[in-house]
Every structure is written in C-alpha cells, then in structure tokens.
Amino acid sequence: MQKCLLSKVLMNIPNQNRNLSTYKPLVVIVGTTGVGKSQFSIDLATKYHGEIINADSMQMYCGAPLITNKHPINDRNGVPHHVMNHVPWEEEYFIHRFEKEALSKIDDIHRRGKIPIVVGGTSYYLQSLLFTNRVVREDTNKTKQEEMEEDNVLSQEYLTKEEALKGLTKEQQDILNDTPIKVHEALKAIDPVISHKFHPNDTRRVKRVLEIYFRTGKKPSEIYENQTTTSSSSSSITTAGSSQLRFPTLVYWLWADQSTLNQRLDTRVDSMFENGAVNEIHELYQSYQRLLTTPENRCQHGVFQVIGFKEFLPWLEDGATNDELFAQAIDKMKVKTRKYSKMQIKWIRNVLIKELQRNTSPEGLFSAELDLLDATDLSNWQENVAEEGFKKFERFLENDNRGLKIDIPTKIKEVLLPNDAGADETIKSKNWQSFTCQTCVDKDSKLPLILVGEDQWKKHLAGRKHRSNLNRGKKREEYEQWVKRQKLVSEEKSNDTESQQ
C-alpha cells in the first residue's frame, strides 16, 4: 500500500515520531488583503502536498474573480481550492454553512493524507474553524441521528434567505423583513444590552442576533456573555460549551509595512480595471437591480457587500457615463481597501492572538504556533516568505510541545503589538455602548448619526466633520435667534404704529 503523502512529509523531518494515523495538523494563513496570502498558500501547498480551503466570504460567490480577488487559476500551480466559487449571487452565505463545508473538507483532506491550508479572509469564519463553540447554535437539542441526516443533505440550513426564515412565525418573519430602523428597534425591545453593540445600519448582524432569540428564546447578550466567560476560564480542562483548538494549528501572519502595502493596494485596484473589472461591476449591478430593489437592502447582503460595488453605485445609477463619478468611485474603493487592511491588522492583534492565548495551554490537547512572515519587499519573497515559511512549517511538525508559541521579529513586534497585547481581555456587555450625535446626520437614513463604542464616539467628537457641523449649527442657531429678534422688533414697530393711529 502506498504511504500517505503526509506520512512522507513527516518521515523526511528529523526527530519525527508522531502517530501518523491520528496527527491532523491545520495550517492557517492570515494577513491583510493584498499582502500575498494566496501566493504563499500556493508555495506551501506545492512543496508539502497541501490543498487550499478558502475562508474569504466574498470568494464563496460564483464569478466576479477580479472584484472578489480570487487567485487566477493559471497561477494556482494545479493546487486544489475548496469552498470557493460555488454560491449563486441570489443566495446568501452564512457562517454555519461555511463551518460545515470547511470542516467536512478538512476531514476529507486529512483522510487522504494531505495538508489542509486555510486562507482568509473573513475573521469570524476563521474563528469558527480554529476553535470549538465559537458559533452560537440555534438548536442544541437535536439528536445525533438528526444531525447526521442534516449533514447528508447538500442544501444545508441557511442556504438562502427563505431557508433562514424556516420555522419562524409570520410575526417574526415580518420583523426580520422590516426596515433597518424597525429591525433594530425590535432588537432593542427584546435585548437592550446587545442592541447597543450593533449599529442600526448593520442589518445583517442585527437580524442574526434576532434570529438567535427567535429560535432559542434566550437573550443573545446572555449567550455571548456565557461564551466569553467560559472561554476566559482559567481551567485547562475543556467542559461542555467551552472553547478549545480543534487541531494542532500553525498560523502564518503575512505582514507588510502599511505605507508599502497602501501603494500595493492602490496598484492592485488600478490593475483590476485594466483587466476588465468594470464588466464585473455592470454584471453585479444588473443582478442587484433584479434582486434587491428596496432601499433598506442596499449592499447589505451577499456578494453585493464586496468592496468595489457600493462605491460605484452613484456612477451606475447616473448612467455609467460620468467620468468624474467613475474617478471618485475608484478613489473611494482605494480608501475603503486601505481602511479594511488596517481593520484586519487590528483583528489579528486584538482578537486572534488573544483567542489563541485563551484557548491554548500546556495541558491542552493541541499546540498552536503563530509566525510572522515579512512580505514588505516582494523582490525578496523567496527568501523572506517562502523559504522562511517552509522552515517554520517543518519546525512546527518537529515540535511536540503543548501550548502556544508566538514568533514575531522584535523590530516588528514593537510596532505592531501594544504593551498590553498579551493581556487576557474579555469583552463585557457593559462595554457595549452606542451614542447618538444630534448635530450630525446619517447620510443613508437621514436620522441623527449613531456611533457604536466609546472609542468611535470620542473619535467622532474630535473629528473635523463633527466640528464643522457643530459650527454650522451654532451659526444657524444664531441666525434663527437673529430672525426672531428682527421679528419681535418688527412686531413692536407695528404695534407702536397702530397705537399712534
């Protein structure tokens, strides 16, 4: 019988004495958009017989390879890619479906003796794979037989909007189908604590927590609080409902200096349109007009959330002929992409690293390692990224220690990680706050602007736009007071004239 490919890999590594029938490592590649995750995944998969699992929520959707940044097929070196390019635009893809599809594919890859390499992507998708019990379940009382039957069905739960509404009453469905403001008000009435965590315009997530309440009868804030309390427990023994690593896990963090990355991202946007991205935008717009006709659904569902579509709506709705609007859309897309890259860094620093620390211990079942690879200088890619990554992969397989190892070069660590980056910081519901600015107006709802989180509120108050609106408001108030005074003066003069007559 031919030895499995993973066995061959392990046997070529010195001091390797693992039980090859049970050792099932997982490789995860994280980093900002445009940093080179896809290229490194190809390098790694080619050398170590790996297969790639996509964890980018936008790349699940069929077509639009440029706007969704799918790695070109010709550049994949024959490496299989899974959980990608399989969801029609008229359907919505939910995290529960991803978790089932990805875990099933990881199991299949392991059984064939290959290395599963997860590339992402969407933060909460990655968390659902790395750790157990990271997704709130609707029904924890299903029998094993029911679960097995569901797993054998190709069209699994949360396949479409209609599927998501199954089992809900007519009244509950009407609530979920109402305007964003009304949906948020419904959540506030049911669970005021968690309602402060979500912006009223964050319709998808607001509906998600409402669904949880409708299906479980439990307040989402209580469920989240129980999860975070359990995950931060100091006990090294996993109990029902607690979180732990699913696999021995090697996490690569591909990183590039932000100024260099910004230039790279701008160039990539320009390259998209040189290669025909405008055709994809027109195709998306045709589907958008057909599927999402009500204003409250604008760009909050499915593939239409992708960066590079919403930014072009003013141009598209104007007839797609205005060069100035097109140039503005390009600029907006570049700004949004750069901002998104910074958000991804924050997630790695403030969430992923802390989750690894919380859920990995010397007494735990599996070890984890996080290694940073410097992808700033593309001319030194082979040495700094590929070869360095290969060394770290083989070292990870050699290492039989439990617990978590983090390897970040000192000079980069000082820039990336704040002094308290290693602290165990559990998000408490009391920190979920929303603030309403009576001076500024939300451009979509035309209602007073709402901000979620104290940091965002402070930033808004110190911002130029708020100060400008504040000054404008003061001037308007002064003008209105002046008009009132003039009116009073005019009335007094009129009364004097009448009395003289």
Image: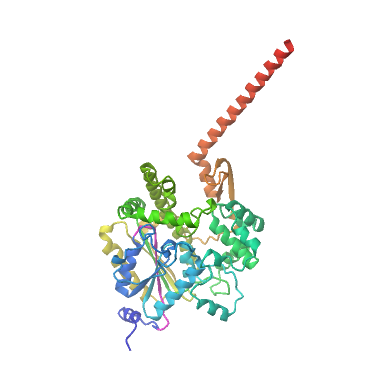
9 or 151: nearer the viewer = 151
**Residue most toward the bottom?**
1
At which x and y percent is residue 74? 28, 66
Most extreme residue toward the top, as rendered? 500
Q: Position of residue 359 (x, y in %)?
A: 50, 69
Which residue is at a point 40% across and 84% down the rendered structure image?
21
Query: Which residue occupies the foreground of this view, 462 or 93?
Result: 93
- The reply to whether the magenta stretch includes residue 393 is no
The quarter in which the N terminus is drawn is bottom left
**As drawn, is 260 to the left or to the right of 182?**
left
Can residue 493 be seen in the rendering of this structure? yes
The residue sitting at 52% across, 54% down in the picture is: 297
The main secondary structure of the magenta stretch is loop
Please provide the residue range marked out in magenta.
21-35
The residue lying toward the viewer, choosing from 28 and 216, is: 216
Please tell me in which quadrant of the rendered image residue 111 appears: bottom left
The percent coordinates of residue 266 (x first, y second) are 34, 50
Residue 9, quarter of picture: bottom left
